[in-house]
Image (cartoon, rainbow, N blue to C red):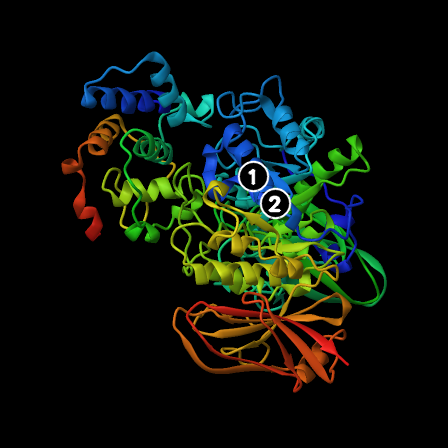
Amino acid sequence: MTPDRINKEGRFDSFDNGEILLNKKKNHLPPMGWNSWNAFGSNNTEALTRTMVDKIKELELDKLGYKFIVLDDGCYKPERVNGRLVSDEVKFASGFNAMSDYVHSHGLKFGMYNDIGDRLCSGAQVGTCGYEDVDAQSYVDWKVDFMKVDNCYYLWDNATFSNPENARYTFAPNIKAVKIDGKEYSAVKDGKVTGFIGKVEKDCVTFLGTFDGTGPDASPLEVRSSELVFEVEAEADKTVSLAVEYATGKKEGVGEWLELAVGEDIFFDDFVEPTESEETFVWSKDFEVSLKKGVNVIRVMNHRRQENTLNSYSRFLRELNKLKPDHDIIYSACEWGKTHPQNWAYKVCDSWRILNDITFRVGNDGDPGVGNWKDDYTPSVTSQYNKAVIMDEFAGLDKGWNDPDMLMVGMNGLNDTQYRTHMATWCMMNSPLFLGLDLRRVEKGDALYQIIANKDLIDLNQDALGVQAKRVFSSLSVEKPDKEYIRDINRVDILCKPLSGGDFALCFVNVSEEDKKGEFSVDVKELSKIFAGIKSAGSYEIKDLWTKEVTENTTGVFTVKELPACASVTLRITPKN
Amino acid sequence: MTTDRFAEYVLSEHERIISETSTDIAKAADRDYLVSGISQTDLQSPVTRKLAAVILHRAMQRLTHEEDEDWGIAKGFRDIYDCRICANAVAQVAVKGILPPEADNFFGMTDVLTDEKASKTIIRLYNKSQRITKLLEL
């Protein structure tokens, strides 16, 4: 097996064109519900799920928007039966139809989980790869309303549990030179390395591919891939030969798959003959290339890390469409930010995870699991927040939503202040809101309930305008608070979210674990320069969305004094007069 | 040792230590819990260190009721996040000194556990005095 041929519409060069594929439905607000993973890991059961359904109804969380009940990893029998998915015989003995019926009978929506690889992350050998048609039929039969699709054991990249040598698909070989119309051009001297990851090593160019975004190391905003570009002048339109001097490898940075283009027209996209080593260079066969009179841009590259993944997520949607063209299944990509899905996922998905998991210490029946406020890697509220907070340009009703992973409200390791800020920022950022706790621990009116059932905050998340908040101030920002990727948490941020009807919300966030003294202010005059919908007014009604206190402001300057460690203040502001 | 045999070994040692013979139903339930979600292919294959960690951690949850600890040095394993499903299990067996990492900062998820090491690991699961406390100083 090798990756599919890819049409122009699924290519890197089409990522920025704003066009969705496969009739993906637009205008979904961020999905809300309960997902089994943070609460029970792979030990979720039919009985536990039914109990969660009952608790959602008892707590009336569905009335606040928590509609989707999603079975995460661990619910399937680990092998297919006659090629089909079936439920785990012990944990879901009654089968998924019964589970779906139970969820639907309570007026809720049913969600399930799978993977674009050949296994699930748990190791169960039931990934959708190659079974998209069969599995789509199963999910239609089970009347699913939501699909979360993971990226473990992916065949065309070195994803989690995949063969590390799969990197050969996603990086170009090391390139030493190209020969065009008989003239040799040095990669190092004559070529230009574009983008973020490519580099010169000795006498060749390497790392022609896409940076792995699973971890928190890089900003999501710039292009995270590289090409090697040559500019060749032709005195007239003509057909010439082109060859590449290369050496292949099978690891991150050096692969065997090459894409060649003149301008935007790809003329080669496949494996090249492997070489003895990454340092043993050979000349490729000659390719025939059409040059136009003037300057021609020859691109040596490999964008397959992003292109393959988009294609794999598309394959499943295509099969769902065939079976049920008018379906409205919410499609959640969980490829952990590895391939920078903010660039492409809007075409086929409703949301996309931006990083690896928010916690690796998930709960179990009787154990709430553990979440962290900060961490050097991804498992913490702030690791996810730091990245998501500058990703507003990728989100919207016509695109979909950045997903900084499920809520950790209710897990050990975080205090009530941290829960509140977690909830407030996720609501401001239009993140999908999936509860990840055992709801038996919640009673109406208790501290956890008041956080997860804060209707005023949920109203921000579900506002019809569908705009993710923008960071308009950060105490550590040098120039552009909405663009700078800041990982140092010793700071205060201010987020602003335009709302329908001319209202807007402000969230003052002390990201640090130390109290912050002083005043933090934002002026409506500055906000109105950033957001067309925010206007100055004679006075403003301000509602604190935690204390519910309502005050009046006549200055247009909104100020918060002193923020305890990890605390936030979230205000809804209604212009008057 | 296959993964399946490793799980059986964990269960039989538990039964031996507590000196109680479980009913067949209870045994089957325990076994189902330990190997839940593990495919037949993996069950019949030599046990990898990551699957050994998963089974040992499940045994701690179900049989010995041992609480999780902070990850400590396990946070520094460069392969710890390669396995979202087993990351916590790996961290727990490592910091508790049951199944030490292969190197200072590398657990060795996919390497096969030799029979000798598998046996020692199961001894350390049930006998805390045998655990490798020096690991904590690595």
Give me the residue at 64% from left, 82% from top.
Answer: A553
Which label was assigned to residue A154?
1
Q: Nearer the viewer, residue A283 or A343?
A: A343
Q: Relative to residue B63, is residue A366 depicted above or below? A: below
Which label was assigned to residue A241?
none
Q: Are the residues tagged 1 and 2 within 8 Å (C-beta)? A: no
| The residue positioned farthest toward the bottom in the image shown | A555
Q: Which residue is mark 2?
A: A60
Task: Please state the horizontal and vertical placement of residue A399, each as a whole percent of the image.
Answer: 73, 55
Task: Please state the horizontal and vertical placement of residue A241, each as a whole percent of the image.
Answer: 74, 53
Q: Relative to residue A189, is residue A409 depicted above or below? A: above
Does residue A485 appear in the picture of this structure?
no
Task: Please state the horizontal and vertical placement of residue A401, each as a whole percent of the image.
Answer: 66, 55
Say which quadrant the C terminus of chain A sits in: bottom right
Say which quadrant the N terminus of chain A sits in: top right
Give me the residue at 62% from left, 52% from top.
Answer: A432
Question: Which amino acid lies under the numbered mark 1 shown in the image of this protein?
Answer: Tyr
* Residue A127, picture quadrant: top right
Does label 2 lie on the same chain as label 1?
A: yes
Relative side of A269 to A188, left or right: right
| The residue positioned farthest toward the left in the image shown | B129
Instruction: Give the CA distance from mark 1 to mark 2.
Output: 39 Å
